[in-house]
Image (cartoon, helix red, strand yellow):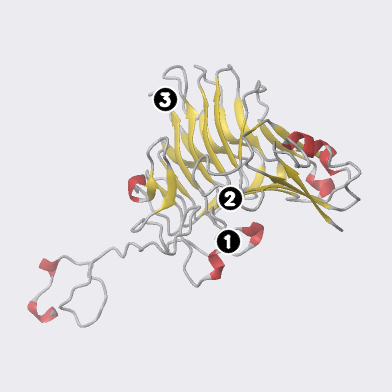
Amino acid sequence: MTTVTKTIGSAGGRDYSTITAWEADLGGSSYSSGDDAVGECYNDSTFDESFTIDDGSFSKVDTIKLKAASGQEHDGTPDSGVKITYSGTIGDEVAIWNVAYTSGTHGEKKVKIEGLEFADILNSQDIFMYSFNLGTLNTIFSRCLVNNIKTSNSSTKNFHVFHNGQSSINNTMIFNCGKTSTSNSVNGTSVGLRLDNTTNNKVYNCTVHNIFDNTPSAESQGAVYGEYRNTIITNANKCYKLVSGSSNSNNISSDSSAPGDYSLTSKDPEDIFVSTTQGSEDLHVKSRAPGLRKGVDLGTTDDVQYDIDNFDRDSTSSIWDIGADQCNTCTPDIGKTPNSKLSLGFMISQELSGFGLADF
């Protein structure tokens, strides 16, 4: 069948001015049964809207992709490409951005969202606030920025950036999200990734930083359920609260909770990222970051090989980094300084005092 690409943006000459209008027309005369629909967003102005992709969206098309147009993607930092926000009324327990089609009818992972920024929401309503619900085996969510989504209501009600569902989330940065009130919250109600308890949730090569709850006695949580590999979570009160299955590996946390084999704990985000300064964040990794060349090759399923900047990790022979960013130009942390007195070039892990003259 045919790939039908439509442009979305506020400038003249675009096919649609809003994502909502594009989605509503997926059953229109531009499409034939079995077509693949692509909506390309342009950085003409900030999109201010919620959207839902559901069974009605699939009356004709086979797959749906919502993406930044070529040259319109972010560069891994805020306000650098296509951005979507929402200033309208948020429904209680209703996600702002929602994918909810029947995968048993239309097939699994028929929706892909990539290369977009979702940001800058401050909710004051007394509601259960969810930013995303990506459905059950519905969505590949890739190479996106999600940042500065917050709720100010003083309440025990939940704030989840990602809520429930079973999805593939990869090479995405999530940061500066949480509850700003300094009272009345309780443990586990401010969560970055609060997913269904199943390994169908694949959170691979993601970077999560500063998931907060400003009530001093309340524990914010980076991750609750899902399978995590090559993922960094820092500056949540509990970075990984719970995970699913036994295949978690190669993760990093700023506390002691990173799950699985070959994971690294108690790592300072200042040693990992280019900048964590609020307002000028850059969560690309820097030289000597602990996760450089410490990841595992996860193959090509769901395009997981493409990092936040759309760099193909498989285009070189480099070992994968942990996190959303692959920095092949960064110098890895080799851990120890070679001892020049040794004819072999291995690293010394013993203290010098442990050697005798016969060792040299």
| Nearer to us: label 3 or label 1 | 1
Q: Are marks 1 and 2 in contact (CB under 8 Å)?
A: no
Spatial distance from mark 3 to mark 1, Cα to Cα? Answer: 36 Å
Q: Are marks 3 and 2 in contact (CB under 8 Å)?
A: no
Within 10 Å of the Cα at label 1, are there few (<14), some (14-19), or many (20+) other Cα atoms? many
Q: From the image, which quarter does the N terminus lie in?
A: bottom right
Report the side of 217 relative to 342 (left or right).
right
Name the residue at 57% across, 57% down.
310
Relative height, residue 242 to residue 337 (above, below): above
Within 10 Å of the Cα at label 3, are there few (<14), some (14-19), or many (20+) other Cα atoms? some
Spatial distance from mark 3 to mark 2, Cα to Cα? Answer: 28 Å
Q: Which residue is mark 2?
A: 143
The amino acid type found where label 2 is placed reads: Arg
Q: Nearer the viewer, residue 182 or 121?
A: 121
Residue most toward the bottom? Answer: 343
Q: Which residue is mark 3?
A: 214
The amino acid type found where label 3 is placed reads: Asn
Q: Which residue is mark 1?
A: 305
Where disc 2 sits, the SS reads loop
